[in-house]
Amino acid sequence: MTAIFEVEKQQQKLRQWIDGNKIARRLTTTDHKGVGLLYIQAGAFFAIFGILESILIRLQLGSPENTLLTGAVYNQVFTMHGTTMIFLVAMPLLIGLANYIIPLMIGARDMAFPRLNALSFWFFFLGGLLLYSSFVLGGAPDAGWFAYAPLTNGQFSPSHGMDFWALGILMTGVSSTVGSINFIVTILNLRAPGMTLFKMPLFVWQMLVTSFLIIFAMPTLAVDAILVFIDRNFGAPFFLASMGGDPLLWQHMFWFFGHPEVYILILPAFGLISEVIPVFSHKPMFGYGAIVYSGIAIGFLSFSVWAHHMFLVGMNPIADMIFSLDSMIIAVPTSIKIFNWIATMWGGKINIKTPFLFAAGFIAMFIIGGLSGVSLAVVPIDFQVEDTYYIVAHLHFVVVGGTAMAIITAAYYWFPKMTGRLMDERLGAAHFWSTMVGMLITFFPMHLLGLLGMPRRIYTYQGGLGWDLWNMMSTVGMGIVVLSTLIFAWNLIISLRKGLPAGNDPWNAQTLEWSTSSPPPPYNFAVIPTVHSRRPFWDQKYPAESEVKNEPVDQGADADIARTFVSQGAISPIIISLGLMVTCYGLVYMSWAIAVGIVFMFAGIIGWVAQPNTSEAKK
Amino acid sequence: MKEAVMQSHSERTSLGIESNKLGIWAFISSETVFFSALIVTYMVMHGRSIAGPLPHDALNVPLTAVNTFVLICSSFTMVSALAAIQRGQTRNLKLWLIATMVLGAAFLSGQAYEFSLLIGQGLSLSKNVFGATFFTLTGFHGTHVLVGLIWIGFVLRKGFQGQLNREDHLSVELVGLYWHFVDLVWIIIFTVVYLI
């Protein structure tokens, strides 16, 4: 008992020190906007590594029989490129944006569990660092981002890389599960008065579906990571066929997570696009219900198509047929969305600003990726092109042309809200056109390479097979994409410093986040708004156009809360996450660090329980 | 355990359910998939061991049946703890929570004893697929019981500090939901691993 009091006292002291230090305060924030920005910054940080890895890959493959990278290093580079871009860049950026925007969109003052929100950020960030530390600790993971058994076996992957992969994935997986629970509760429970489910902005809807996908898909990945870790470190035979284990079990369980994961990456992107297109078309969204229901349909279907990644393993024809048909059916709700976006633009007064350019570019790129996806659902075609560059082309059109384009759209759209400044339009247009040209030159030739038989994951190839020109082209395209990314970075930096003031509502938008100041105050809204339609801010601005009459609201109680609102920080999430990280190092090297880490975690939990929560602090 | 719920929301939530309770339900549904994946792994590997010891020779069903009974009893004491605080009986709450912890600890001791017997027979994670799947599945369940015990410990501490009463007892309800879930998972594991 005295030990517990001592731990509590020490953490109290730590908190006092933090309150006086600006950087420490930002790192220990539990405010949804602060945590959102941490996510976005960390995602951008890991993106630098992910892009550097892709540069290495393209340089290596630019010419035949290149010796820039050895096969062993190449394996590490492409494994980390995939793992980084999916788990450490795309997901955190989407979750970070959602963290910042969703409470504002639904008229809430914070997430439902602010401290848990900080905890999920630290789990993700330290998990990412854990994964990257493998580069200097004897070798990075090298069995591909989907880590097929038996490649993960100690015999074929002797460095500690895959151990770090398993534990890093586990930490980021727990992070996104905890984060999703937070989103589900926030979205379901903290909506402003009057905002029924079917008055929620579409981004909120898609994030709700995504959060359910995460909490149901991530646990299988967690089990996968645990099993592979036990296999490697305790000699268990889960995936060892000679001992009665089952390598195919890995594929089933991985893709049971992996296919919903595809929609975890793309549904929020659909949501982002559905926010941007109506605003810049100056119209309400066409077919709001269709977008919602198709999103839910995609969510359900995504759990029934995982084995289309596995046609080549030789399942029976009936299974092939079912998974093939299911995969094609998913194209239906997806196309519905595309038609809705186009119909929203149709006849609208289109305001061609950078966010709109990227949203339109998203539609074009995603259609290419979607079409190659439908072709892959056809079993005989899949037999031909499985494990070739055709797959690489498809997945990059979906993830870069889809998710990344949507994230960039969102960056241009919400940058003014987050910083109070506008981004440069001319640089934005330059960024857009160079991205489109660069992406098409980089990824389109990969379709042809795949059809010409170039396998994935090879580190070099002989000349004269008809692959040289297309590979060279793809590498040149990569250069253009890198250039466009530098333009983007430059735009972000100068706009942050010298951008024109944005005001509260630079785009004449429809949703609540634009009704508050830019950047929003800690309490978000002085008075929690009452919602009457799907375009609550529009109603406030143009009462004549809306069918609902704004009735006066009692502002007393809410305004009081806003005045006294203090967004508290918390140190315990960092302590718990650090403890888990130390435990993970202990597990890799089987050392006393396990115990140290657990003690740390326990100290963090004690601090967590002891810290009074916001509402108590005010009493 | 009471997470920082903003004051304006603690009074009214959109669904009318406390946010913490909704969060626990979401967490439990995620955990359901976690244990399903482990149980499916066990079932897929069932009967594929190349070397012994095999389930029918190694497992001591009567011992584990007693252990299962102990864990089911702990669910009963947990229900009683919640019932007590809902009637405002803080003393009974503490007694029932302590009883739950004792039963939970007894279950864990029983499991540790069972593990030691199995290891004595030569079973291990690396011996065969039965050992690998058995220890992973029951080990993760045991870890969940341990987490539950620590959690109950924190709730009990709150009880001793006088922070729980007839109106404010959500933390008992939350740990109870988790505890019953862990129990339920054990009943399924017991059926799949020991009885089938």
Image: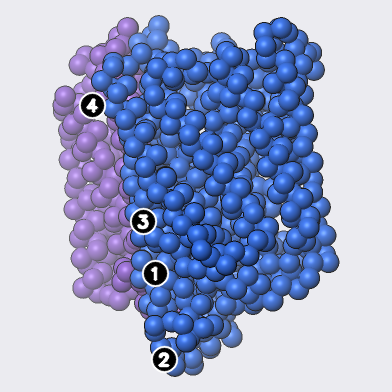
Chain colours: A blue, B purple
Q: Name the amino acid, label 3.
A: Ala
Q: Name the amino acid, label 4.
A: Val
User: Which residue in the protein does label 2 denote?
Assistant: A551
Q: Nearer the viewer, residue A214 or A548?
A: A548
Circles 3 and 4: CB distance less than 8 Å?
A: no
Instruction: Look at the numbered disc 1 and give the secondary structure of its residue.
Output: helix
Percent x, y of residue B42: 30, 24
Q: Residues within 10 Å of mark 1 (few under 14, many from 20)?
A: some
| Left or right: A571 in relation to A62 | left
| Left or right: A67 in relation to A190 | right
How far apart are the two marked residues, 3 and 1, measured between alpha carbons? Answer: 14 Å
Furthest residue in direction front, as rendered: A347
Q: Chain of mark 4?
A: B
Q: Nearer the viewer, residue A399 or A77?
A: A399
Instruction: Look at the numbered disc 2 and give the secondary structure of its residue.
Output: loop
Q: Chain of mark 1?
A: A
Same subunit, labels 4 and 1: the answer reads no
Q: Name the amino acid, label 1.
A: Lys
Same subunit, labels 3 and 2: the answer reads yes
Task: Specify which label sits upstream in the sequence, 3 or 2.
Answer: 3
Q: Name the amino acid, label 2.
A: Glu
Q: Residues within 10 Å of mark 2 (few under 14, many from 20)?
A: few
Q: Chain of mark 3?
A: A
Percent x, y of residue A537: 51, 77
Instruction: Look at the numbered disc 4 and give the secondary structure of its residue.
Output: helix
Of the numbered discs in the image, which one, if any, rests on residue B193?
4
Residue at figure coordinates x 81%, y 52% from the top left = A490
Circles 3 and 2: CB distance less than 8 Å?
A: no
